[in-house]
């Protein structure tokens, strides 16, 4: 199994913590700290990483030792800190592994060849190389997907509100962008997130300037807004994917609806939408909390763990 498989990521993290924990001096200690038998622990580590626990720990410790030595720490201090019985034993192991004595550590790359891409990462972390055979997601498309998913989540949470709460002007002077007008309520803020995408899609697709009835809080409740957003979110995502695949994010739109007309490049439009959507989503969280509805943080990292 590939060690980057998301379904195994948390368990892999637990196993790696046990392997590199300074208090775990042997495989038995590692297994006990991860609540597994020594046999099962060793089998799982080897299956997920391609290395035995002892070999993985030794390599990570040697990488960390090489980095510390390269920073000027004495051999005796590093050898003791990394669990070697003596500086002499450590020096022999270091020379066998890196091909140079510890005194030359500053002249070499501290990373060693690894079957799994797992390495020590300064000062106290681990680094897992990506799978070179897998196409990594484009950051802009990742942010677009998160924005759509998080907006849908917030609108769904807002369905718990009464109509009065949806319209309640708890931030009466709140203006995000002057041309969008006041956004004093949960309904107004969430509606503005959706309407912004609708306006820019109309500009990109060459359609007339849209009305706001489908996103105004007094004419559309959370349930109606959710349905409208589902359609717009799908179209918005498809637009970004299409223009990205065609290498056309640098295309420019000269918007005649502006007075005077203005020019916008597509990647700038996407950045604009993401920036103000993120701001409004966090405002919506604060406003929902004032109505007694606690929401997740909106952190893309948390969202990625669940997807």
Image (tube, rainbow, N blue to C red):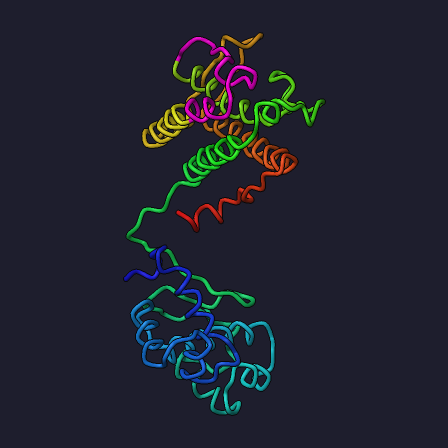
Does residue 177 sit above or below 279 in this rendering? above
Q: Quadrant of the N terminus?
A: bottom left
Does the segment drawn in magenta span residue 227? yes
Q: Where in the figure is residue 92, as x and y percent of width and height?
A: 44, 88
Q: Nearer the viewer, residue 208 or 244?
A: 208
Image-based side of 63 in relation to 245, left or right? right
Q: Nearer the viewer, residue 154 or 99?
A: 154
* Number of numbered discs visible in the structure rendering: 0
Instruction: Tell me which secondary structure the magenta stretch mostly adopts.
Output: loop
Q: Where in the figure is residue 154, as x and y percent of width and height?
A: 51, 34
Does residue 23 sit above or below 177 in this rendering? below
Residue at x 42%, y 40% (from the top left corner): 142
Q: Nearer the viewer, residue 58 or 92?
A: 58
Image-based side of 8 in relation to 169, left or right? left
Instruction: Looking at this view, name the residue that lies furthest to the right.
Output: 173
Q: Which residues are magenta?
A: 206-229
Quarter of image, res 161: top right
Does residue 129 sit above or below 27 in this rendering? above
Does residue 253 sit above or below 302 in this rendering? above
Q: Where in the figure is residue 156, as x and y percent of width and height?
A: 48, 33
Image-based side of 270 in relation to 170, left or right? left
Residue at x 63%, y 25% (from the top left corner): 185
Q: Nearer the viewer, residue 47 or 60?
A: 47
Q: Where in the figure is residue 261, as x and y percent of width and height?
A: 54, 10
Quarter of image, res 7: bottom left
Quarter of image, res 171: top right
Does the segment drawn in magenta span residue 20? no
């Amino acid at each position: 199994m590939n060690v980057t498989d998301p379904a195994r990521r948390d368990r892999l993290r637990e196993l790696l913590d046990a392997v590199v924990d300074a208090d775990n001096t042997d495989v038995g200690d590692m297994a006990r700290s991860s609540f597994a038998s020594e046999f099962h622990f060793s089998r799982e580590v080897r299956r997920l990483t391609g290395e035995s626990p002892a070999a993985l720990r030794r390599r990570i410790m040697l990488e960390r030792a090489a980095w510390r030595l390269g920073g000027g720490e004495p051999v005796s201090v590093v050898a003791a800190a990394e669990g070697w019985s003596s500086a002499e034993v450590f020096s022999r192991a270091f020379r066998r592994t890196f091909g140079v004595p510890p005194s030359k550590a500053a002249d070499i790359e501290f990373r060693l060849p690894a079957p799994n891409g797992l390495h020590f990462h300064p000062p106290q972390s681990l680094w897992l190389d990506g799978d070179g055979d897998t196409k990594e997601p484009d950051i802009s498309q990742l942010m677009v997907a998160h924005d759509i998913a998080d907006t849908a989540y917030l609108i769904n949470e807002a369905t718990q509100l009464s109509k009065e709460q949806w319209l309640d002007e708890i931030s009466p002077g709140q203006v995000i962008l002057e041309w969008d007008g006041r956004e004093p309520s949960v309904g107004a803020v969430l509606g503005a997130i959706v309407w912004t995408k609708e306006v820019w899609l109309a500009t990109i697709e060459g359609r007339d300037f849209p009305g706001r009835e489908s996103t105004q809080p007094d004419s559309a409740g959370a349930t109606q807004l959710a349905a409208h957003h589902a359609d717009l979110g799908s179209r918005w995502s498809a637009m970004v994917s299409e223009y990205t695949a065609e290498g056309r994010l640098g295309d420019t739109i000269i918007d005649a609806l502006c007075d005077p007309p203005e020019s916008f490049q597509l990647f700038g439009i996407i950045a604009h939408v993401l920036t103000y959507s993120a701001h409004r989503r966090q405002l919506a969280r604060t406003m929902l909390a004032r109505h007694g509805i606690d929401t997740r943080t909106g952190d893309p990292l948390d969202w990625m763990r669940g997807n």
